Image (cartoon, rainbow, N blue to C red):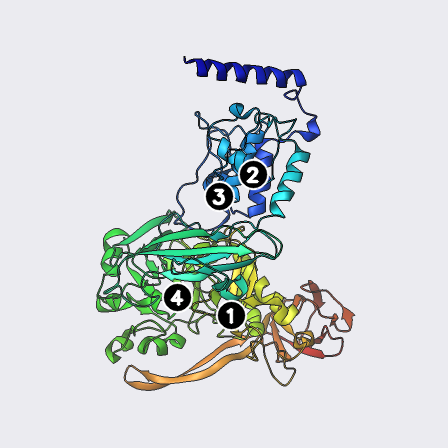
Amino acid sequence: MSKLGNIKKLLVFFITLSLLLQGSVFALPVNERLTKAEFVAVVADFFQWPHPTEYNDIWHPPIKQFNDVKISDPYGKQIECAYEEGIIEPDENGNFNPSKEITREEAAVILVKAFKIPLTDKSVMFSDHVTISPEARPYVNTMADLGFMSAKKGSLFMPKDPLTKSEFEVLFNKITTTIVAPVQALPKPYYVSPRRYIKLYCPTPGATIYFTTDGSEPSTESDIYTVETKGHIMEMVGTRGGTMEGVDPEREVVYKAFAIKDGMIPSTVQTFKWKLYRPAKADFQSDLILEKTESSPAVYRIYNDSEAVRPMAWYIEGKDKGILYDALQTPADAGNLKEYVDKNLATKPYILIIGHEHGDHDAQAPNFLKAGVEVYLNKRGWASTAGSGGPFASIFPTAEDQAKVKDIEEGMKFDLGGGIVFDVYAIPGHANGNVALHDKKNGLLFASDFYGCTRAGSADNVAVSGVKADLLLSFVQQVYSKYKKDGGKVNLLFTGHDESPLGEYNLLLFEAALQQVIDNGEAGCMPTLRTNDAPNSRTTMIGDMWKDGTNWIALKLAGIMGDDTEYLTNNSVANYNGKDGYLKYSVLSNIEIEGGELIGTTVKWAEPVTFKWAGKEITVENSLPNRFDPWTFNYTIEVPKSQKTITVIPTTMSTRVTSIKLNDKEIGYRSRNEIPVSDGIVFKITVVAPDKITTSTYTFIVKTK
């Protein structure tokens, strides 16, 4: 060893001995002890980094993990987030050592990395600088140069000393009130996907974000980003409905952003790069979701990686028959889903049911028609498939094909054998022809696009502007009652864009999202998450797609935030779109009758459509029969002669109503009320709106049979 090396070694020894004699490495009081896990958790929470398990993004790579940290551990998620961000690293054994006290030099390294502070080239000399780990010195020097950290005693930095809780509180407050935190981007920009909806945010409250999307350096002359004005910006390969002809399947997206706030040092410019890849052509693929049993069907998920908006189709097979539900986006001349299903999935005869008429769910239908497979599509969706539907091509352009398409409507049943029966329900809103299939016994519900998409990576929301929000709430409540009637269950929900089945909770979220609009009017809405294809659209949202996994919902209603579009009903009872109009809801949205059957009325939500189909001009009504209509006030209830009582469960359109009375007796929202019945008996329900003025009374006449 050289003479200089011996001197350094001795110097380290004497400094360490000096520190020991000063008692600075003795144990801290328990309440001052700060572990590495606690330290990292504060940093991660400040930056609001979502853990990969908290959002639904199939493109995310496997989570980076330490050997000694589990997600269920205290601060386990924050530690893994920090690892993903690259601000902490494992030791030689792959461990993080979360319960160890954080040292001063470790804190310096993590904070400089987290706040993206440029490293100083100054050599800030502490008398014990040789005891600072070589890899930590530039970080310690940077913190010292900016005045965030200083010598602990005299000129000693004491790098291996633990940082106390009180010291960290002062330090972190100094940093977060001096420099603006670096801009963050979601989804994370370091893995490949075919499409991204990009959100920027700054953890510093009140900071203004400036950004560019062409790779140029941003300045205060650049565009300002807020979620309210920019939403999640869509970046994709090709277009939502177009082909990949002439389109490069690979694309790099480069954003640059920084943030400023008066009185603080601006953040450094951050560069975010997303690599997009969407193959021009790909094979169909499938996964087994549920295995077939004697009493339940097999369910397969089918998809194609070349499809722009990545829809899902579902093959369902029972003892004797099968159903293919939806037909994806790949054009019929670019692939053959019929051949794929026959070769890889189907062991029984099957039919095709198109859940709704949009081009990302019915494109392969012609191949099934050509092969003689029965194809079902609700007639309210026929018009758009006869011509071009938005960004999608016509699916059934010829009279010959149109004549082969069969109508499917609520009330129909499909028996797959072995006691597996699917009931059909009509649920308009996203599309006039949307139909759901429900296996009441096994609790399987296939709903195409109606109940939502929960993919954070696509900032998906569901357009339900085809029906006024209040009437849609009524429809949703009524169909849910039908799902549950006679012991029916909803255990698994299969949608048109979620790769994995959801649960009954997502149906309740859908209802709750509409309910908050009825209860609060426009205050229950926000601008859309999707700016490119739906800028500032009136949207109702519950939950956080970056924190709540699949348990969130966003519904796009009619119109733009703040405009005069009538997204609520306007009729002779009230204009609920006017100022404080939502306070005038004195109506029921649903009424359930146990022991009897409500005879409903025909409810219309849109004008009829006249078009040419199978060589003839036809008119299709956009209405549903035998429904409860909130603005029809006289009903008949049929009751078996042997029935002595019925149970009435009223649901008011607004949960904020002043009162609900049954025959002048105050009752509760969705309360169960038993009523003695006989032929001709009449009972009334009176609802007083939140405004305490508007009142509606429903009259129900019992008819025995």
How far apart are the alpha carbons under marks 3 and 2?
11 Å
Q: Is residue 634 above or below residue 650?
A: below
The three-letter amino acid code for the residue at tag 4 is Gly
Q: Earlier in the sequence, mark 1 or mark 4?
A: 4
Query: Which amino acid type is shown beneath numbered disc 2?
Result: Asp
Q: Is residue 482 above or below residue 380?
A: above
**Percent position of residue 285, x then y:** 29, 52
Q: Which quarter of the rendered picture does the N terminus lie within? A: top left
* Residue 73 seen in render: no
Residue identifier under label 3? 118
- What residue occupies the far right of the structure in this picture? 665
* Badge 1 amino acid: Asn
Place residue 316 in its image quadrant: bottom left
- Secondary structure category for the residue under label 2: helix
Point out which mark residue 145 bears. 2
Determine the secondary structure under disc 4. loop
Say which residue label 4 marks. 355
Label 1: element kind: loop
Which element carries disc 3, helix, strand or loop? Answer: loop
Q: Position of residue 142 (x, y in %)?
A: 53, 38
Tell me how far mark 1 sits from mark 2, CA to CA: 45 Å
- Residue at which label 1 appears: 536
Q: CA distance from mark 1 to mark 4?
A: 28 Å
In the displayed structure, 59 sits above or below 378; it is above
Q: Which mark is residue 481?
A: none
Is 378 placed above or below 553 here?
A: below
Q: Nearer the viewer, residue 554 or 249?
A: 249
